[in-house]
Image (cartoon, coloured by chain):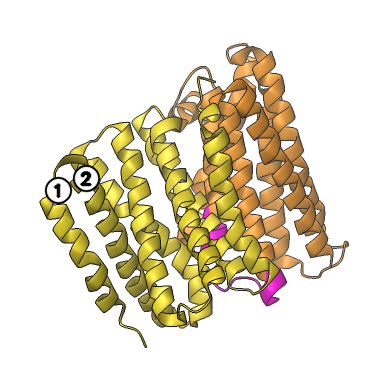
């Protein structure tokens, strides 16, 4: 059994010190990284609680409950930042991505402690796959907030829609990587490909009007 | 077997609709194409999640939050698309105040919502009913406005019709799934499932026609 709060303390302490010592953008980025890790810890508790409450096993929880919980929790630090600080568009995008990176980093650290660090190739694929998946999910929401909607009510409705989009994307990823062999490898590769395609073509999709 | 074939057809058509919409969005940089891509893309992902669950675990998800959320999100994006293509932005309650017969739509969706609550969970049924009400209201109002000569000059008539076919196919499928079981082609559920899948080819055609005109 691993105590994820202990891992959290080990990882979060240096980040917190760095955040206190830094100023401006650096501090903001550290706080989002820390926020992402904290949300990963909390979503793990919430998923486990819901799974126990409704009486499902761990596999079903990771396939059916975790995608919903994790995506909602991952969005909360950014939502807080949006509502309290009313930042500009670049700050929103950075915040969303750093939260996703923090979330993925903590998830990978917990995976390592549970499964060992023996297989470098598998960890390499998993590290990039999980990292890319969380970044893609974060990017989907950031794109909606920044690019797609100009009116506030459209932004709210669209963000809910994109949050559901990212939950489903996350759910499909979890189903694929819960298998072994080709389905798992496909699951790991899809987010990496999505990131590459988004980097290449993303800017060209920036909408003008109708 | 038939269910697997229908799922595969729907996956192919929703995937094709997403790719086509993304290509048009890429070329024209128009928001409507991005919205159509999001609508079909999120519907595709919901289907894919359901299909993969069936393939790998030989059962449907016990708690279908992920798929339900994705399908609701798809209705939401289609609704945003309809709002985007309307020249005059009017709220649903104003539509119903202007045309009394429009009250039949929320009455219908509310009745269906209460009926489906016998099987599904309350929150998802309410969310689906609200979104379906929006879709039906905007589609009917769009067609009526165009018949009266005060809405987009008939450009998006086909898009409104496609939306109506989509919504009614969904409702008929849900109704049949309550009463009719069986994995054979004799089950009318599958006929409307294929009709629903077919609308995903109609949507890009309808939108292209509307945007070009």
Report, in whole angstroms, how far the alpha carbon at label 2 lies from the one at label 1: 6 Å
Element under disc 1: loop
The part of the chain drawn in magenta is: B54-69
> Which residue in the protein does label 2 denote?
A26
Residue B103 visible to an observer of this rendering: no
Q: Which chain is yellow?
A: A
Image location of residue B114, percent across then percent down: 53, 58
- In the depicted structure, whether residue A31 falls above or below residue B95: below
Is B44 or A12 nearer to us in this picture? Answer: A12
Image location of residue B177, percent across then percent down: 71, 63
Query: Which residue is found at the position 30% from the left and 48% from the top?
Result: A78
Q: Quadrant of residue A73?
A: bottom left
Residue B143 visible to an observer of this rendering: yes
- Asked if residue B50 lies in the magenta stretch, the reply is no
Query: Which residue is found at the position 55% from the left and 64% from the top?
Result: A125
Q: Which chain is orange?
A: B
The subunit letter for the residue under badge 2 reads A
Outermost residue to the left: A21
Element under disc 2: helix
Q: Is residue A17 left or right of residue A127?
A: left
Q: Is residue A99 left or right of residue B81?
A: left
Image location of residue A90, percent across then percent down: 32, 34
């Amino acid at each position: 059994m691993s105590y994820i709060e202990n891992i959290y303390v080990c990882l979060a302490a240096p980040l917190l010190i760095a955040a206190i010592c830094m100023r401006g953008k650096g501090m903001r980025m550290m706080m989002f990284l820390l926020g992402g890790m904290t949300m990963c810890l909390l979503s793990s508790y919430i998923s486990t609680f819901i799974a126990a409450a409704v009486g499902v096993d761990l596999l079903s929880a990771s396939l059916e409950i975790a995608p919903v919980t994790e995506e909602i929790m991952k969005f909360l630090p950014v939502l807080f930042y949006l509502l309290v600080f009313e930042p500009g568009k670049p700050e929103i995008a950075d915040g969303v991505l750093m939260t996703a990176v923090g979330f993925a980093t903590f998830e990978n650290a917990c995976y390592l402690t549970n499964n060992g660090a023996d297989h470098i190739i598998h960890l390499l694929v998993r590290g990039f796959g999980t990292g890319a998946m969380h970044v893609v999910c974060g990017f989907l929401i950031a794109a909606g907030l920044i690019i797609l909607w100009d009116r506030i009510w459209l932004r709210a409705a669209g963000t809910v829609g994109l949050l559901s989009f990212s939950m489903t994307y996350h759910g499909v990823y979890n189903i694929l990587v819960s298998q072994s062999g080709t389905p798992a490898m496909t699951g790991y590769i899809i987010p990496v490909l999505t990131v590459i395609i988004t980097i290449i073509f993303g800017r060209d999709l920036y909408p003008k009007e109708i | 077997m038939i269910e697997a074939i229908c799922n595969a057809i729907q996956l192919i058509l929703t995937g094709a609709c997403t790719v086509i919409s993304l290509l048009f969005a890429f070329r024209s940089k128009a928001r409507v194409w991005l919205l159509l891509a999001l609508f079909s893309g999120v519907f595709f992902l919901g289907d894919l999640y359901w299909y993969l669950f069936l393939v790998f675990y030989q059962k449907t998800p016990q708690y279908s939050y992920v798929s339900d959320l994705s399908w609701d999100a798809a209705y939401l994006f289609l609704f945003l698309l309809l709002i985007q293509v309307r020249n005059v932005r009017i709220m649903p309650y104003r539509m119903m105040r202007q045309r009394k017969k429009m009250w039949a739509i929320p009455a219908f969706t509310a009745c269906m919502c209460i009926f489906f609550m016998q099987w599904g969970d309350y929150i998802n049924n309410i969310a689906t009913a609200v979104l379906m009400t929006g879709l039906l209201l905007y589609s009917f109002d769009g067609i009526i406005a165009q018949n009266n000569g005060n809405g987009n000059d008939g450009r998006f008539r086909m898009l409104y019709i496609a939306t109506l076919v989509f919504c009614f196919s969904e409702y008929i499928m849900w109704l049949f799934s309550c009463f009719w079981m069986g994995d054979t082609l004799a089950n009318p559920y599958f006929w409307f499932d294929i009709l629903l899948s077919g609308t995903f080819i109609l949507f890009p055609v309808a939108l292209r026609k509307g945007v070009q005109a």
